[in-house]
Each structure stands twice: as C-alpha cells, then as structure tokens.
Image (cartoon, rainbow, N blue to C red):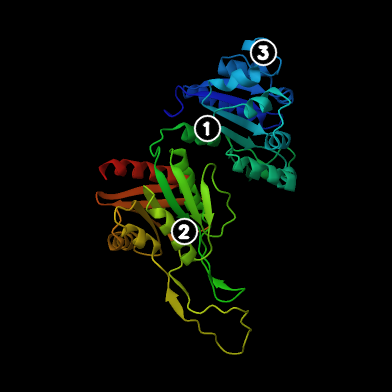
C-alpha cells in the first residue's frame, strides 16, 4: 500500500506465542516500503529470536533499556522520536496493564510512554485473561487515552481452548496501520455522525426500537478520524466503544438525538446520518408499567423529527450524507429518499444484510451516478465512503 511506503514504523513484540505473527507483519511492512525498527521484550525473545526480526527488517533489534549503542543511552526516548507510528503486536495482558497504569520498567513500555506518535496495540491472550475484569478495565483506559486497540478476535489458541483473545492476522493489522498512516483527506474538517438505534418508551420498562447494532456508524466515525477529521459521534444505545480520538454523545430517543445534532450541526463541515432513527414514537408513554390484560393493547404513534431533513434544510449547513436501509427496490427507494431530502450523497443497503453483521455492501448515489461497493468489512466500506465524500467536498 502506498500509504505505508516511506513511513517509519516501530514494531514492539511482547512475550506471547502470537509473536510468530509479528515476523510476517514485519515482512509486510518492509515489502510495502516502510522503515521498520523492532523492539522486543525479554519474554518475546523466548518465542522468536531477535535474529529473525533483524533479518526481516534489515536493522538491529533492540531489547535492552541500557543499550549503549543508542545515542545518549536513552533508548526509551531516541528509538521512537523519528517514528510515524508504534505498533505492539502481540500485546500481552501484562503489557496492557503496564501501559494502562503508566509503568515503564522495560524498554518497550518506557518508549511507549515517552512517544510523540500514535500507538496501536494488538492484544493476544487466553480467553479468560481477555475477559478478566482487570484486563477489560485496562483496555477501556487505554482507549480513553487515545490508544488504538486492534482486535482481538475469536479463534483457535495455542492452549486449544479457543474463544476471544486470538491476535488479528498480520494482514489485518497491516491494513489498520496503513489506514492510520494514509492521507488525511478530511484534515481540519468537523464531522458530525449519528449511529445506532433509537429507543422510544412505551412505559417505564418497554419501548419501540430496532435491530441496529451501531457497527456501521462507529466504523464511519473511525474512518473519518483516520482521515484527519475532528469527529463527534451522537450515538444511540450500543455496547460499542467509541473509536480512538472520537467524541461520543450518548442519547436514547430520536428527540434527544435530534436536539444533540441540531445543537452541533451549524458548526459541522460534514453530517453523516447513519443511525437507524425510529420514524414514530408512542404519543403518550406511560409513567408506570402497563399491566397485562386479557384484551389487545392499542398504541397511538406520533412522527419523530426528521433529523437528516432538518440538517439539510439549514442555511449554509454541512455537506449531508444519508443512509437508507431498504427491504426492496433498493436503488429506486434510495434515490427517491435522496431527492426528497435534498442531499448530495446517500449510501443504501438491504436491512437484512447489515443489522448486527460485521460486513455490509453499499450502493452510493449522488448527482453523477451510482457506485457499488461490494460486500466487505464495515470498516473497509467506511473508508471507501469517506474517500468518496472527500472527493465531493472540493466541488462543493
């Protein structure tokens, strides 16, 4: 990938069996034209030798905090100063705990603390270690500190138990790093995004909602942040963590989402409405639980505000991008929605193929035509969408 060519990568390797994948990751970076410097912990050297990484990277491998060959003997500072990114793969439970709590008792942890460049970490560990409450607290703290967490995923483990905790494959980590190092096509742009479902209460315990997981909206937020944008994400209720560097505003109902968006829309350069907003809400939600009866229950529904249409109608408002989840006649219904709301770009998909899934397929519609984005991981599609938006902005 051209995004990696000429970039300076520091690859950190910690002591887990997945260290063998780091050798392939090194090869991919070098093949793409990156300058790779490898730093290993003492435990990592028990799994793969420094000679392996030296052969692959073409550079000496650093393992010692007290390495006299580093200028001024300050490897924890000097080794990262000229780097564009630090990638730690694999990152063990112990290493996550060190970084989350500001500990730097070896070369790799110390240089991560002293860095000036982005840090990306690919965890790898036993399923119980990954699910441990302490590990999850550490991961959330690192995310809130702006560290990008890559994975892990489910699959086979060296302990033969399987489950969540397997490190991502080298190709996937490479693609994530390439995206981070890619051109900042939305640099200095303010991007406002909605994601997830809305929930409209019927009474104090029941409500009307939908099957949206928020995965597509969160992927778009990540892609926009990777492209250099200042991203605000207005999110309905999901279990997803906010992407690194993204400001998240939590809402519940369509009315709350509408108010949060309208309060920020005038300052935005781009508005991307990915959320699956309920079109209707119960007119009179009850302040108590409705008791079960023998007969039927009738609910009177009132229309919710049309967030996308209201933003599109703003004088000198942001560049607006809509999403449409259809069940039939995808192109015709999507184009009708785009013209009805007077927006320059709309991304359409089939509802049955997106809700709750990690992959999707998108059809983009603008004034110049229709563009098909074949099924892929949602983050891949999100990056393609952001690139399309960036191309349209100069003309606007």
How far separated are the C-alphas under marks 1 and 2? 36 Å
Residue 313 lies, in percent from the top left, at 31, 60
Looking at this view, is 250 or 130 the one in front?
250
Structural crowding at the residue carrying mark 2, measured as other residues with C-alpha within 10 Å and reported as few (<14), some (14–19) or many (≥20): some
How far separated are the C-alphas under marks 1 and 3? 31 Å
- Residue identified by numbered label 3: 73
Answer whether residue 196 is visible to the viewer in this image. yes
In-image side of 131 versus 307 (left or right): right
Residue under the image location 56 percent in, 27 percent down: 116
Residue 100 lies, in percent from the top left, at 68, 38
Q: Quadrant of residue 126?
A: top right
Looking at this view, is 346 or 265 the one in front?
265
How many numbered tags mark residues here? 3
Can you say which quadrant of the picture contains the N terminus? top left
First reached walking from the N terminus: tag 1 or tag 2? 1
Residue under the image location 26 percent in, 50 percent down: 369
- Residue identified by numbered label 1: 174
How far separated are the C-alphas under marks 2 and 3? 51 Å
Q: Which mark is residue 260?
A: 2
In-image side of 159 versus 257 (left or right): right
Can you say which quadrant of the picture contains the C terminus? top left
**Cβ atoms at labels 1 and 3 below 8 Å apart:** no
Indicate the secondary structure of the residue bearing disc 3: helix
In-image side of 239 versus 272 (left or right): right
First reached walking from the N terminus: tag 1 or tag 3? 3
């Amino acid at each position: 990938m051209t995004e990696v060519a000429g970039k300076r990568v520091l690859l950190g390797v910690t002591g887990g069996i997945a260290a063998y994948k780091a050798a392939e990751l090194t090869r991919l970076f070098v093949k793409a034209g990156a300058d790779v410097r490898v730093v290993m912990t003492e435990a990592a050297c028990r799994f793969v030798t420094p000679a392996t990484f030296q052969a692959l990277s073409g550079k000496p491998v650093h393992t010692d905090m007290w390495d006299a060959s580093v200028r001024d003997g300050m490897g924890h500072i000097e080794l990262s100063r000229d780097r564009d990114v630090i990638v730690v793969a694999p990152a063990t439970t112990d290493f996550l705990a060190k970084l989350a709590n500001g500990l730097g008792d070896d070369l790799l942890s110390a240089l991560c603390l002293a860095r000036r460049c982005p840090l990306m970490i690919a965890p790898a560990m036993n399923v119980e270690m990954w699910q441990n409450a302490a590990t999850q607290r550490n991961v959330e703290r690192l995310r809130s500190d702006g560290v990008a967490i890559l994975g892990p995923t489910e699959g086979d483990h060296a302990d033969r138990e399987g489950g969540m905790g397997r490190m991502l494959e080298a190709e996937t980590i490479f693609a994530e790093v390439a995206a981070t190092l890619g051109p900042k096509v939305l640099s200095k742009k303010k991007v406002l995004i909605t994601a997830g479902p809305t929930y409209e209460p019927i009474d104090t315990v029941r409500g009307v909602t939908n099957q949206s997981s928020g995965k597509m909206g969160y992927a778009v937020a990540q892609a926009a942040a990777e492209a250099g944008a200042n991203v605000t994400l207005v999110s309905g209720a999901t279990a997803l963590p906010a992407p690194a560097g993204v400001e998240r505003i939590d809402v519940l109902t369509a009315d709350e989402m509408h108010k949060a968006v309208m309060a920020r829309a005038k300052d935005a350069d781009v508005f991307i409405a990915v959320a699956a907003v309920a079109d209707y809400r119960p007119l009179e939600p009850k302040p108590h639980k409705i008791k079960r009866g023998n007969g039927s229950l009738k609910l009177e529904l009132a229309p919710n505000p049309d967030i996308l249409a209201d933003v599109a109608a703003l004088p000198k408002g942001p560049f607006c991008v809509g999403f449409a989840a259809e069940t039939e006649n995808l192109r015709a219904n999507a184009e009708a929605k785009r013209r009805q709301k007077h927006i320059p770009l709309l991304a359409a998909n089939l509802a049955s193929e997106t809700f709750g899934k990690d992959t999707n397929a998108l059809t983009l519609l603008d004034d110049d035509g229709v563009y098909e984005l074949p099924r892929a991981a949602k983050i891949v599609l999100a990056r393609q969408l952001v690139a399309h938006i960036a191309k349209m902005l100069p003309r606007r």
